[in-house]
Image (spheres, rainbow, N blue to C red):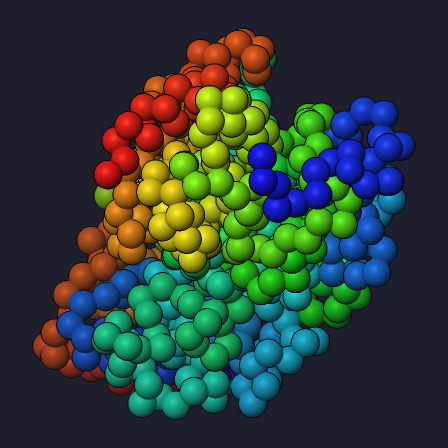
């Protein structure tokens, strides 16, 4: 990835953060922290790697994406709207009665969502099923899953991990949004997951750990993961919960919190500074 | 007895049957038969393929059989993922794990996601026998009944299983098949037709209606009806193979005709068939009802015969309860 390309993606990441803050501040409350930590991963996937067609969201040969941490829906909705799956106006309907953008991802409501998620621990199993199905049906698409610290606590995630390596699912790549915060506090005070890379390696996965906000590092890791065809890959993305939101960045209390117009304005001021630094 | 079906043994085909087939063998044969013509049929197991009879499916279609080891939650999640691609997955395990252990996975990843997962639970209720209380599911129908739009089916014999399984496979939506896996007495003659969601009227009588579900209790209900006939009591007998959606029309017709309804299930009477029938009667045609099944107890270990006695899942108990119920008729 050239530095120009990386700068373009950085600009896109700021736009996605704006759209996501806009959605949640419009509603007044939401899962802001975990939506901010996944932005670079989503931007890298949706603007550079995933084979998808916004005009044909169900295209059979597409790559599939499973957002196992379903509460990060708002960040994904921003990306999908920006990529043209639906209008950005729809973002203002987040969590309103009758909306097609519920807090947790719903494949039956939102164009571009490949799997319904929200009960943590279930996404990776579904991704394993999709990857097995692609193999059975001879489909070329890759399957990408994104799990979080909460998913990592769930036993089912490790059941899925075992089955993915048992079946040699080289068409499956997963990211861990390793922001090291869970609802009740920092993971070190609630449920430690030290040596996460070694854990995934010991489950038979190809594991890499990279800075989850560094596009060049993420892109290099994803390329290596996509080149690995014999076993599933895990990219542990070292991230910050509430990334780029002054005042609440890195605070576990930002998991699901009220956001007002003042917060929005403060964040947007910071985004303007980030944009200026890029130009 | 005024039978409305051709009983097993009546037709030429049954003459060659020396012993009753195992339900699990019929289940696997039927899956293989469907899979021969349809590559969307996939079977998943959680280290119980030998118990559930699906080893033969694995031998025939190794690439379309997925054993995930002892990880039922993952099995249901993987099945949900497969079904997003139009694959028709049949994950199976014992009823206790199918319902209790994977409830949230089946609820969210399969049902709420509007996917197409055909979950099969085997060894329902007292059929778990020597596996004992830990494996004895008296609550699985209850759990499944609370899932919106869920289809719950418990066939009573191999003929009905063979007829209902393709209907389960080819209706869009997740479902729960409650499968007795061991050999059982045949009830229906070959060729009897069944429709998912429509109860089977086995016999018609005027004094009482016995509505039963599953391999054990439909057979006991028939024996009870024959015993009652000896006391001059004529019974309507219904095989309610589909517990949800329940055949309301048939329940109401039976209540109108007989004025008394006895339900029989190898399950808690709370939130099982008895509750489902009571809901229909309350809404449409209240008549005296009694429910034979498990009365708020956990399971325990023993032979199936012992456990049927222990929990009152016998034709003798049905006769007793029927006689009491008839006295309550208006």
At 50% from the left edge and 59% from the top edge, which residue is drawn? A146
Image side of residue A145 versus residue A194, left or right: right
Q: Residue at x 85, y 55 (%)?
A: B36
**Residue B118 percent coordinates (x, y):** 60, 51
Which quadrant does the N terminus of chain A fall into? bottom right
Work out whether residue A55 or residue A23 is closer to the camera in this orientation and state it: A55
In this view, which residue lies farthest toward the front?
B232
Q: Residue at x 57, y 59 (%)?
A: B116
Q: In the drawing, does residue A204 fall left or right of residue B28?
A: left
Give the total number of marks visible in the rendering: 0
Quarter of the image where one finds residue A240: bottom left
Q: Could you say which is closer to the camera, residue B315 or residue A224?
A: B315
B41 versus B25 height, above or below: below
Q: Residue A41 appears at what percent x and percent y?
A: 48, 67
Left or right, B176 with reference to A34: right
Q: Can the viewer see residue B316?
A: yes
What residue appears at the point 47 percent right and 46 percent down from the top-left corner?
B243
In the displayed structure image, the side of residue B8 where residue A265 appears, left or right: left
Front residue of A192 and B139: B139
Q: Relative to A171, is A94 above or below?
A: below
Locate residue B37, reporting x and y percent. Answer: 84, 60
Quadrant occupied by the C terminus of chain A: bottom left
Q: Nearer the viewer, residue A222 or B189?
A: B189
Q: Residue A191: in sight, yes or no?
A: no
Q: Position of residue B219 (x, y in %)?
A: 59, 29
> Vertical placement of A51 versus B186: above or below?
below
């Amino acid at each position: 990835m050239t530095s120009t390309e990386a700068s373009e993606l950085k600009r896109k990441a700021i736009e996605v953060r704006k759209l996501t803050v806009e959605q949640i501040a419009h509603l007044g409350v939401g899962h802001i922290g975990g939506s901010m930590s996944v932005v670079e991963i989503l931007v890298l996937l949706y603007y550079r790697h995933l084979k998808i067609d916004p005009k044909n969201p169900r295209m059979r040969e597409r790559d599939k994406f499973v957002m196992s941490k379903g509460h990060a829906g708002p960040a994904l909705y921003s990306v999908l709207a920006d990529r043209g799956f639906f209008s950005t106006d729809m973002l203002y309907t987040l969590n309103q009665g009758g909306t097609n953008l519920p807090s947790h991802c719903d494949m039956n409501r939102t164009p571009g969502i490949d799997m319904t998620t929200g009960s943590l621990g279930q996404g990776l199993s579904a991704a394993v099923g999709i990857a097995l199905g692609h193999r059975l049906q001879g489909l070329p698409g890759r399957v990408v899953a994104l799990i979080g610290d909460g998913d990592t606590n769930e036993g089912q995630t490790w059941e899925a991990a075992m089955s993915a390596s048992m079946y040699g699912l080289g068409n499956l790549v997963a990211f861990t949004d390793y922001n090291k915060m869970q609802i009740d506090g920092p993971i070190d005070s609630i449920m430690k997951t030290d040596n996460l890379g070694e854990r995934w390696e010991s489950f038979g996965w190809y594991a890499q750990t990279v800075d989850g906000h560094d596009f060049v590092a993420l892109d290099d890791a994803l390329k290596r993961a996509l080149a690995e065809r014999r076993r599933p890959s895990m990219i542990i993305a070292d991230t910050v919960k509430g990334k780029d939101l002054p005042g609440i960045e890195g605070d576990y209390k930002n998991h699901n919190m009220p956001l007002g117009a003042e917060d929005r304005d403060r964040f947007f001021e910071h985004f303007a500074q980030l944009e200026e630094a890029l130009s | 007895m005024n039978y409305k079906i051709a009983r097993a043994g009546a037709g030429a085909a049954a003459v060659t049957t020396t012993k009753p087939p195992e339900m699990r063998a019929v289940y696997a044969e039927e899956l293989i038969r469907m899979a021969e013509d349809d590559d969307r049929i996939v079977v998943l197991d959680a280290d119980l393929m030998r118990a559930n009879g699906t080893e033969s499916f694995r031998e025939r279609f190794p690439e379309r059989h997925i054993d995930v080891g002892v990880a039922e939650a993952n099995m249901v999640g993987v099945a949900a993922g497969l079904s997003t691609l139009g694959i028709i997955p049949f994950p199976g395990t014992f009823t206790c794990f199918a319902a209790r252990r994977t409830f949230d996975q089946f609820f969210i990843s399969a049902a709420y996601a509007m996917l197409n997962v055909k979950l099969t639970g085997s060894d329902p209720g007292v059929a778990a026998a020597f596996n004992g209380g830990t494996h004895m599911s008296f609550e699985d129908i209850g759990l499944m009944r609370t899932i919106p739009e869920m289809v719950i089916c418990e066939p009573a014999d191999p003929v009905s299983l063979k007829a209902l399984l393709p209907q389960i496979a080819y209706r869009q939506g997740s479902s729960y098949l409650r499968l007795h896996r061991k050999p059982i007495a045949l009830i229906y003659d070959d060729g009897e037709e069944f429709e998912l969601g429509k109860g089977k009227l086995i016999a018609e009588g005027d004094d009482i209606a016995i509505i039963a579900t599953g391999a054990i209790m439909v057979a006991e209900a028939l024996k009870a009806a024959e015993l009652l006939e000896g006391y001059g009591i004529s019974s309507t007998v219904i095989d309610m193979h589909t517990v949800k959606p329940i055949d309301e029309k048939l329940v109401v017709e039976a209540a109108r005709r007989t004025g008394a309804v006895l339900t029989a299930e190898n399950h808690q009477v709370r939130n099982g068939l008895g509750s489902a029938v009571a809901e229909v009667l309350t809404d449409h045609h209240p008549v005296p009802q009694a429910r034979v099944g498990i009365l708020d107890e956990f399971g325990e270990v023993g032979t199936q015969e012992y456990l049927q006695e222990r929990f009152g899942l016998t034709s003798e108990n049905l006769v007793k309860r029927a006689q009491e119920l008839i006295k309550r008729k208006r």
